[in-house]
Every structure is written in structure tokens, then in C-alpha cells.
């Protein structure tokens, strides 16, 4: 396809928001405007692009230093890409300059490549990424270190899978062997304080390591991980059930503390919050209860969700019953979702 034809295609499709390009070569010379600068039909609506690194940055092999495909998409936010060979030094610098010049909003990257290429992309091409996704086989100490360069801005770190129906399957998938330990991966929740979504699907972590690590991502909303010892449906179900019960207990305790103007603990609620249970299921549930905004969990079998409006909240004030003088009761600061404690977890996604 010529660049002129590609520009014309973009022009007649103004409603496009996502573009996927595969095995397409742009062989013609660039189009110039009257000032002899490169001209492209920019498409401001496209925010998602799926194309290989070569497709984007070597779109015109006949021209010595052509503008990349990124020049067409000034509002690009997400790029899914792949590359078999590590880019040379000159190409890495060209990629960095093109991203900075044409796509300042490009902060979400899904990359299928070898570890050295991923490291180059994360350390020499991109800055301040918000989301990084990669294949699980590309996890390594080097890629983890490269991910941490974006720790101040990252809200999503995920591995992707080509397994169809993984999250709906009745079978628990086998864990895989990696050259790194779960301890290394745990540096992500330890240092990425803005993290909201973490998906590490096939690497099995030790519960001891999880408990010893300070998870500083306090606003975590989604967690997909595997934990050694939590390897049957029954154990996973019990861990989830204990998490649900713990959530309800915490909400009830918040209610009682405010109502009674006391910080004393109800012993019956304490038992629900798993104080004396040291099983792997209870340890997992206790860990999950640290995250008040957590709404979606996968521990190896079926995704479990909590309705957004029913996440744990801090109750600011509450008055129950009539005040002296016959004034009516007030529930001004009580969230509506709090009134249905037993419905706090969505069963439909189990």
C-alpha cells in the first residue's frame, strides 16, 4: 500500500478508534506539503493500534529516514506490538524520538517480544508508562527491573495468555516454571504505589514471601495471581468465602464502632476476620482484606468480583435513632450500598 492510499483510507473512516495492521508494506516515497516537510493524513480518533515494531518504524524501506506510522495518530494511547529481533541502537533512538514527537499520550504498551527487546523498549524508548503487558514467558529479572523504571506512574502490570477460556474453565491451569522466583515479581506491588491491576497468571508465589513483602499499592482493585498450596477448587473457594466474610465483618465493625462511639472490637466479628485461623486459605483472605478497593480476584479458578459500590469504605459519621427533642434520625453519611451487607459480593461472576 502507498502512503497516499493509507492517508486516503484514514480520511474516509473518521469514526475509527482502533486499527490493526499486519503484513502491510508502505513502499512509496513520503508525501510532502509545499514547505517540503512530510505530510500525513492524521486521524485524531484512533487511540488503539496493533502493529509490529517493523510495521510502525520501518514502513518505508526505500526512504532513508521516514516518519513512522505514529505520525498519523496524534492521540494514540495504546499500542500492542511484537518484534522478533532486538532493535539496533539507531532504531531505538528513532523510536524514542518518534514517540515523544507524535504520540505524547502513548502510555499503555502490550509487547510480545524477547526479554532484551522488552528491556530496550521500557528503558530507552518509553517514559512514565501507565500500563505494561507482556507474555508470561518473557518475565525475567531484567524485565522486572525495566518495569520498575515506571513505578511512579504504573497502574497496570499484566501477563497475557493465549489459552482460550482460561478464566471460565472448570479446570485449574498448571503453573509454569520460570527462571525467576515469585519473590522477584513481588517487587512490583512493593514499589509501584499507584498499581491498581496486577495479573501474573502462571507464576506460583509463596505465601510466606507475600506476607513478608510490604504491598504499598493500597488502591489495588484487581489481582490475578497463583499461590503455592492454594491448588484445589475447594481451597480457592474457601479463601474467597473467608475474604467475603471478612469484608462483611469489617463493614459491620465500622458500623458498630460509630454507632457505639467506641473503638472496641466485637469478639464475634474478630472470629470472622480470621484472627485464629492459620490455614493457607485464611492467610490469603487476610492478605486480600488489606485492600479496601479490591473488587476483582482470580486465584487460579474463576474470576470473583465485588460490585464497585460495595467496596470497603470509611464511614465518616452516623446517627441512629431519635435525638432528644424528637429530631428525626439521620443517615446522611451512610453509603446506600452499606444497607445491603449480605449482597456485598457479586455471585454472578463466580
Image (spheres, rainbow, N blue to C red):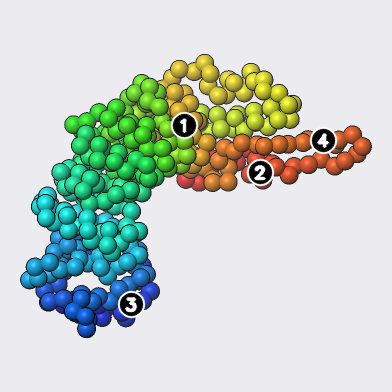
Q: Which residue is mark 3?
A: 13
Where's residue 214, x and y in %?
Answer: 40, 27
Q: Which residue is mark 2?
A: 335
Q: Do the residues under discs 4 and 2 have CB atoms within 8 angstroms? A: no
Which residue is at a point 59% across and 32% down the rendered structure image? 248
Residue 312 visible here: yes
Which residue is at a point 58% across and 42% down the rendered structure image? 310
Mark with earlier residue (2, 3): 3
234 or 22, which lies in front?
Answer: 22
Position of 341 with respect to 276 (left or right) is right
Disc 3 is placed on an element classified as: loop
Which residue is at a point 18% across and 31% down the rendered structure image? 179
74 or 316, which lies in front?
Answer: 74
Q: Which residue is mark 1?
A: 288
**Label 1: how many residues lie within 10 Å, few (<14), some (14-19) or many (20+)?**
many
Q: CA distance from mark 3 to mark 4?
A: 61 Å
Mark with earlier residue (1, 2): 1
Mark with earlier residue (4, 2): 4
Which residue is at a point 68% across and 32% down the rendered structure image? 255
Q: Residue furthest right?
A: 325
Q: Which residue is mark 4?
A: 321
Q: CA distance from mark 3 to mark 1?
A: 46 Å
Disc 2 is placed on an element classified as: loop
12 or 161, which lies in front?
Answer: 12
Q: CA distance from mark 2 to mark 3?
A: 45 Å
Amino acid at each position: 500500500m502507498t502512503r497516499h492510499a493509507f492517508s486516503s483510507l484514514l480520511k474516509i473512516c473518521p469514526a475509527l478508534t482502533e486499527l490493526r495492521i499486519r503484513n502491510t508494506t508502505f513502499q512509496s516515497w513520503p508525501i510532502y506539503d509545499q514547505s517540503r516537510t512530510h505530510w500525513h493524513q492524521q486521524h485524531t480518533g484512533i487511540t488503539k493500534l496493533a502493529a509490529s515494531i517493523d510495521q510502525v518504524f520501518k514502513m518505508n524501506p526505500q526512504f532513508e529516514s521516514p516518519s513512522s506510522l505514529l505520525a498519523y495518530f496524534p492521540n494514540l494511547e495504546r499500542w500492542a506490538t511484537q518484534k522478533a529481533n532486538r532493535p539496533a541502537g539507531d532504531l531505538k533512538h528513532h523510536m524514542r524520538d518518534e514517540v515523544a514527537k507524535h504520540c505524547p499520550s502513548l502510555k499503555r504498551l502490550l509487547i510480545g517480544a524477547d526479554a532484551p527487546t522488552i528491556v530496550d523498549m521500557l528503558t530507552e524508548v518509553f517514559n512514565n508508562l501507565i500500563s505494561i503487558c507482556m507474555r508470561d514467558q518473557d518475565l525475567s529479572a531484567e524485565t522486572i527491573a525495566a518495569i520498575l523504571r515506571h513505578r511512579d506512574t504504573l497502574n497496570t502490570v499484566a501477563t497475557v495468555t493465549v489459552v482460550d477460556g482460561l478464566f471460565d474453565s472448570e479446570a485449574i491451569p498448571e503453573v509454569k516454571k520460570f527462571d525467576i522466583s515469585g519473590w522477584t515479581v513481588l517487587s512490583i506491588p512493593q514499589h509501584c504505589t499507584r498499581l491498581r491491576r496486577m495479573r501474573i497468571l502462571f507464576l506460583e508465589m509463596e505465601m510466606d514471601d507475600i506476607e513478608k513483602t510490604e504491598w504499598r499499592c493500597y488502591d489495588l482493585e484487581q489481582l490475578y495471581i497463583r499461590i503455592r498450596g492454594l491448588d484445589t477448587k475447594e481451597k480457592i473457594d474457601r479463601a474467597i468465602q473467608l475474604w467475603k466474610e471478612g469484608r462483611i465483618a469489617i463493614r459491620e465493625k465500622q458500623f458498630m464502632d460509630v454507632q457505639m462511639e467506641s473503638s472496641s472490637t466485637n469478639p464475634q466479628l474478630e472470629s470472622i476476620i480470621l484472627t485464629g485461623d492459620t490455614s493457607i486459605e485464611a492467610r490469603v483472605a487476610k492478605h486480600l482484606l488489606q485492600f479496601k478497593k479490591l473488587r476483582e480476584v482470580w486465584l487460579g479458578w474463576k474470576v470473583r468480583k465485588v460490585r464497585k459500590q460495595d467496596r470497603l469504605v470509611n464511614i465518616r459519621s452516623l446517627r441512629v435513632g431519635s435525638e432528644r427533642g424528637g429530631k428525626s434520625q439521620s443517615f446522611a453519611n451512610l453509603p446506600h450500598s452499606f444497607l445491603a451487607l449480605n449482597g456485598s459480593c457479586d455471585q454472578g461472576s463466580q
